[in-house]
Every structure is written in C-alpha cells, then in structure tokens.
Amino acid sequence: MAAAVLVGVAIRLVFAFTAGPDDPLDFGISDPSYYHYQANLVAEGVGFVDPFDYGFRFLTAPSATHPPAYVLLLASGSFVGATTLRWHQVLSIGIGAIAIVLIALVGRRVAGARAGVAAAAAAAVYPHFWLNDTTLTAETLFALTAALVLLVTLEFLERPTLRATAAMGVVVGVATLTRGEGILYLPLLVLPAVCARSGSLRRVAGLGVLVTATALLTIAPWVVRNVTSFEEPVLISTNADDVIGGSNCPPSYEGEGIGSWHISCLTAKREGEDESQTTRRHRTMAIRYAQDHWTELPKVGAVRVARLWDLYRPFENNAAGLARPEWASRLVLFGYWAVLPFAVGGAVLLRRRRATVLVLLAPVVLVTLTALATWGAIRFRVPAEVSFMVLFGVAVDWLIHRRPVRLPRDRAATSP
C-alpha cells in the first residue's frame, strides 16, 4: 500500500509541475481559482467572501458559492505561508494520498489485504483522481470522504455501536460540507444500514435519530452562518441554484449541448442584490423553464445520466476540463473504460454478500441522482469511482489467485 501511495504522489507531482497550470489565472473565473483565492482570504482573516468580487471590485459581501470544507483545508496551508498555487496543489495531492490509503482500507475490509493493495494501486494511477488532485477541485476531498463513508458504514455493519453510529453521522456531515449532494448519503446509505443492522424497531429509531442528529450538528455552524448572512435562505451553498439555472435553459435542452450546463443562461448580479438573491432568481427562472418544457424532461434527464457515465458524446464530456491538456482528458476516459469491466466483475463476485454490495453501489445511485437533477458532469462521478477502485481490487485478487471468493457472510444478513 505504501508503494502505491508513493507512486500515486509521484504521478501527481510530476503532472502538477510539468503539465499543470502554474498560475491561478490559467483556470480563468472557475472553481479552482475560486478555491485558491478564497482560501488565502480566509487565512488572511477576510473570511468567506467572493474572491472575484473582492479582487475586481473590493467587495467583502459574504459568499457561500461553495461549501467550506475544501477551502478550509487549503486555508490551513495558507495560514502557515503556503499561499501559492503550487503549495495548494501539494496540499491537495496530500489529501489524494490519504484517499488512496482509505480506499485500500475499504478494499481490505471487503475482501482482504491483497484486494486492498490492488484497490490502492488502481486509485494511485487512476487518471480522474490524480487530475482532480492537481486541478484544485473539491472532488479531491469528496473522494476522501466517500471512502470514509464506506469505511465507517462497513464498520457499523460489523459492530453497530453508538460510536460507529455517531461516526457515520459526522462523516456524512463532512461530506456535505465538501459538496452539497453529500447529504444524500444519509437516506441512500447510512439510514438503510441502520435499519438493516439495528434489530428492534426501538433501536432502529434511536440509532436513526443519533446518526441524523450528528450529521446535522456537523453542518449546523455553516448553515447558521448562511441563514444569518443572506437575504434569501441558504443552507449549504448558493452554487446549487446556479447549477440548476445553467442546466435548465434552451442550450441545455436541445442541440449538442443537451444534458450539459451553460453559463450563458445565468445573468449578472443586479444592483443591490446579494449573492443569495441573484442565485435564487436563477433557480426561479430554471424551474419556470422546466415547467414550461416538462415534456422534454425525460429525454434531457436520460442524456444527463448518459453523459455522467460517458455513454453520450464521451470525448466531448472529457474535453470539457479545467485548463487540462487534451491528452490528460483522453486518459481520464480510457482509464474509466479500463476500470469499469473489473468493477462490474468485482460486484458479481461479491453478489452473495448483499449488504456489502449495496454499500459499495450506494454512491453509484447518489451520483446518478445528482446528474439527473442537474447535469451530466463527469466530476460528479468521483464517489462512485471510489467504489469502482474497491471492486477492481476484488476482481484483480480473484484473477491472480483463481480461487472462489469465499468470504464471511455479512453480519447484517444474520442480525435478529
């Protein structure tokens, strides 16, 4: 596993220092430059303000364009002087290295040490992971939290203690503070695990309340900050309204851009508006457009999901990167195609362990629902790809040893 981590870090460093951007402005007005500049502002004590408004118009109005977790991690480096793009890339690569370790631990828990090492090796060289780790996107941290959610949920299924229950809630909260759709882990994975393993109805209710309460308490400080800072209600981020706004408009419902997102559908901030009012207007316009074109929603939704899984215009999807070389985008696609058959095979090999398979496939459902409700960005696929690495490890372990997968049954299946 250590070797896999070292190889993964080496790949990421080589790409960052040879082929990656060396100036935040190379990303343009986009998520990576937003995270970089806002992290520095947080470390300076300016706070969570829009870095572009601050840099171009000297405005210090509060911002919640993105959840705070990834920014805070980058800000921890800025606080000790690591304020450059390169230092933030190195910090992000460190997060990616920890994700490789956690993926290995999930693989070991699912199918043993060899499967864990194979999963770590796959995660180390998987292009979509190392490209995100060097591009400064929150998906780096979201991959780590996805592996943590899987790990603590599997731990809970083995030993359904109060501590394990609370840990699931905290990790779901951190995932939500990384990307808003992380809250979907609660109904799609964590609460079903509680129901499967807790026994009596009374215990199910008690643990369900505990895991929900710990998740909500984890995100509560950020939610309170948002509710008290903006004119319109904001829970996790205002970006969700912009995502909906750019994916429900004429260019995203027809032609080559169907199922994608278009910034041209968004309007500029009006005089006197705060961020929440602007994005709420975008959401209102998007909902109205979707209602007026409801007959097109099945087709648009199908294309969104097809784009997510690279079943529709895959080369176009992967080319829509953030200052990424074309060859790197191609590697993302080819890496995905190479891993997918092994992941399917791993799921088949584990089919007798129903609870484990359901845990590993829950992120697949999560990212599919996210794309269906918004647009088919391949970046949304990262949590599912964490599961794919684990299933890849299962399949490779079987291929190497050519033996039946004789693993202990899920304890959840034998619980009273």
Image (cartoon, grey):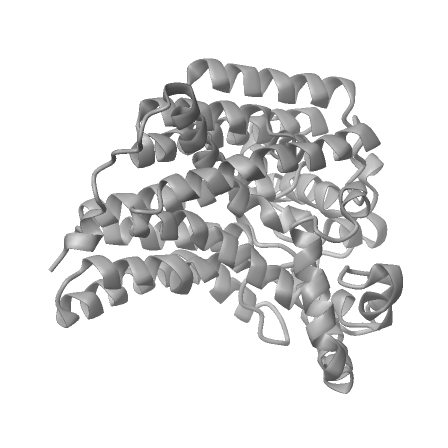
- Of residues 366 and 145, the one nearer the viewer is 366
- Left or right relative to 141: residue 397: left
- Left or right relative to 4: residue 33: right
**Residue 319: x and y, percent?**
81, 41
- Do we see residue 217 in this rendering? yes
- Of residues 64 and 146, the one nearer the viewer is 146
- Residue drawn at x 82%, y 67% is 266
Residue 244 vertical placement versus 318 (above, below): below
- Residue drawn at x 75%, y 66% is 247
**Residue 336: x and y, percent?**
63, 37
Point out the image quarter for the N terminus.
Answer: top left
**Residue 271: x and y, percent?**
84, 73
- Residue drawn at x 59%, y 43% is 139
- Residue drawn at x 53%, y 29% is 123
Q: Quadrant of residue 268?
A: bottom right
**Residue 58: x and y, percent?**
80, 52
Residue 277 vertical placement versus 7 (above, below): below
Q: Quadrant of residue 125?
A: top right
Q: What number of labels is visible?
A: 0
- Left or right relative to 383: residue 380: right
- Of residues 232 and 366, the one nearer the viewer is 366
- Do we see residue 162 in this rendering? no
Q: Quadrant of residue 192?
A: bottom left
Point out the image quarter for the C terminus.
Answer: bottom left
Residue situated furthest bottom in the rendering:
292
